[in-house]
Image: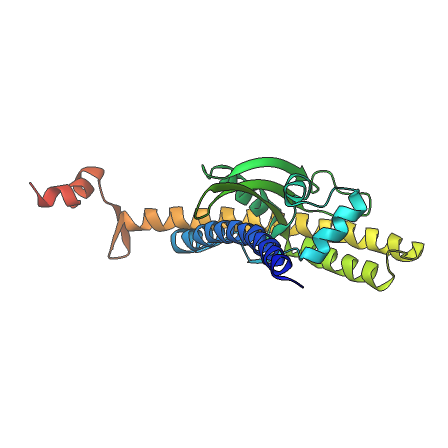
Amino acid sequence: MNTYQVQQFKKIRDEITRFMMMYKFALNEVETKIEILQEEFQMLHDYSPIEHTKSRLKSPESILNKLYRKGIDISLSSIKSHIKDIAGLRITCSFTSDIYRICDMLKNQRDLTVLEVKDYIEYPKPNGYRSLHLLVEVPVFMSDREERVCVEIQIRTIAMDFWASLEHKIYYKYNQAVPSHLLRELKEAADAAAALDRQMERIHREVKVIKEEQEEEEVELMNQLVINNQKFSIPDALLKLLGPDSKNA
C-alpha cells in the first residue's frame, strides 16, 4: 500500500468514525434527558415511571447488511437518509399509562423533534408485538457544524419487554423459520401479557386513589385538635394567624 492509499484509508476511517460518533453523542443526549426526568420524578413524587433503560448502536457491519437488503447505495449520506435506527434506546416501565406519560414528556422537550410515532400498543403487530416507537431528531454540535441525528426510542412495559426478548430469542434459534405451533403459543403469550398489563394498570389506579384519600385524611387531621377525646376543628382564621405571614405582622 503506497502513501496515497494509506492517506485515503485514514480519511475514510476518520469519516466513518466521525459519522458513528454523531449517533453516539445523540444517544448520550437522549439518555441524559431520560436520567433527568427519572431523577426529577423520584425526588418530587417518590415514584418514577421509568424502570430502566438500555441503549445500543448498530455496528457498521449491521448497517452495511441493512443497506444490501434494502438495495441502497453505499455512502454515508445514503445511510443517514435511509437508516433511521442506527442509535436506539429502549425504556422499560411498570405500567402502560407510564409509556404515554414518558412519550408526552419527550414531546415537550423543545430541542427534540418527533418525526414519527408508531403505536404498537393500541395497534399490535399480527404476531402480538406491543411497544410504542418514537423516531426523534436530536441536535448534535460537532467542532465545525451542527448535525440533526435520528434516534429510535422504544417504550414498553416489563411484560412487553419480556415477551419481545423471548420472541427474538426463538426467531434467532430457528433462523426465522419458527414452527406454526410456537407462533400460535407466542401470540397467546402476547395476549396474556397484555391482559396482565391491563390488570396491573387497574390495580395501579386503585392504589393511587387510596393514596390520595389517605393524604386528604391526613390534611383533615392536621386541621383538628383532640382534647379529652373531643375533636375540635381549627378555624381558618386561626390557621392564617399561625401561618408564615403572621410572623411578619
Q: Nearer the viewer, residue 175 or 181?
A: 175
Position of residue 25 in the picture relative to residue 185 (left or right): left
Q: Position of residue 1 (x, y in %)?
A: 67, 64
| Residue at 63% from the left image edge and 41% from the top image edge | 77
Q: Nearer the viewer, residue 163 or 154?
A: 154
Task: Mark yes or no: residue 90 visible.
Answer: no
| Residue at 82% from the left image edge and 43% from the top image edge | 126
Q: Nearer the viewer, residue 243 or 113?
A: 113
Q: Position of residue 84 (x, y in %)?
A: 65, 43
| Residue situated furthest right in the rendering | 180
Q: Position of residue 204 (x, y in %)?
A: 57, 50
Q: Quadrant of residue 175?
A: bottom right
Q: Nearer the viewer, residue 118 or 10?
A: 10
| Residue at 28% from the left image edge and 56% from the top image edge | 229
Task: Mark yes or no: residue 106 visible.
Answer: yes
Quarter of the image with the C terminus is top left
Position of residue 224 in the picture relative to residue 6 (left or right): left
Position of residue 80 in the picture relative to residue 29 (left or right): right
